[in-house]
Image (cartoon, rainbow, N blue to C red):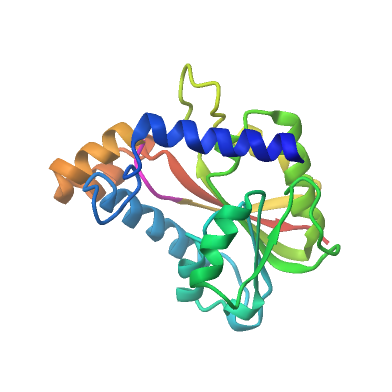
Amino acid sequence: MNDLRGETRAWYTDYYVRTGTDRNNIRKNPEVLFQTLANEKSVVHAARNIPLEPPDAKVLDVGCGAGGNFFQLFRLGYRPENLSGIDILQENLGEAKKYYPQVRLVCSDASCMPFKNNEFDLVSESTMFATLPDEDLAGRIAAEMLRVCRCGGYLQLIDWRTPKPRDRHYSALTKSRLRHLFKLGSATELIGISHGSLIPPIGRFLSKYLPASYFPVATLFPFLVGQVVYVLRKKT
């Protein structure tokens, strides 16, 4: 696990060296605002395809980082005492703990989770599989997400479906990859796809310079939407 932890830490270090520390800062970077709003819209829309009672549901956020997705879950009605997060970097969880002390936070490898079989009603991830080009590792994490999700429970995959040519650190979560990782048809069924942010070069440009055109462009040209939310149901 130490090797994987080191690789993960190196990935984030390289990312912010290349893009700058304010790359995803919604307050400081005007390129981010409408990308974030579109992402949030897709998560809210996806929630309508998940017939759970949020106050009672047990939720796991896989690769939770510093807890950036927790607020959205709370806003949808999920309770912090029923929410767990797992991440391989302790420094990320330390940040999350400052803001979300009621959430159960676990520092561990997501490909070997310390949770019981069928423990959660909803298992979620955000932009994790797109940054996992190692298909063996991605497969093991997907298998663990399936294991800890209860039969009849739901998986929410907030990720990027569009390729990024010449980037060896990136592997889009296409429908064909989704089918392979999560055994669509046998272990799971796809019950919904919600469309979110535009592909970054276009979305960031529009967010900064032509914000009023952002959502019309996404509606008129859906093939330019790169981020989606897949909702799967685990079969009984």
Q: Main secondary structure of the magenta part?
A: loop
Q: Which residue reaches farthest right?
A: 117
Determine the residue positioned at 81% across, 49% down: 112
Q: Position of residue 38 (x, y in %)?
A: 34, 53
Q: Quadrant of the C terminus?
A: bottom right
Q: Nearer the viewer, residue 54 or 166?
A: 166
**Vertical placement of residue 92 versus 60, above or below:** above
Q: Which residues are magenta?
A: 195-199
Q: How many marks?
A: 0
Q: Is residue 9 magenta?
A: no
Determine the residue positioned at 60% across, 83% down: 55
Q: Nearer the viewer, residue 204 or 222?
A: 204
Task: Please state if 137 lies on the left or on the right of 225 as rendered.
Answer: right
Determine the residue positioned at 32% across, 48% down: 35
Q: Quadrant of the N terminus?
A: top right
Q: Nearer the viewer, residue 234 or 147?
A: 147
**Vertical placement of residue 2 versus 168, above or below:** below
Determine the residue positioned at 63% across, 54% down: 90
**Vertical placement of residue 191 versus 207, above or below:** below
**Would you say residue 204 is visible in this rendering?**
yes
Task: Please state if 227 lies on the left or on the right of 88 as rendered.
Answer: left
Residue 136 placement: quadrant: top right
Q: Position of residue 30 (x, y in %)?
A: 21, 48
Q: Which residue reaches farthest bottom?
A: 55
Q: Position of residue 191 (x, y in %)?
A: 61, 56
Residue 205 placement: quadrant: top left
**Would you say residue 161 is visible in this rendering?**
no
Q: Position of residue 5 (x, y in %)?
A: 67, 40
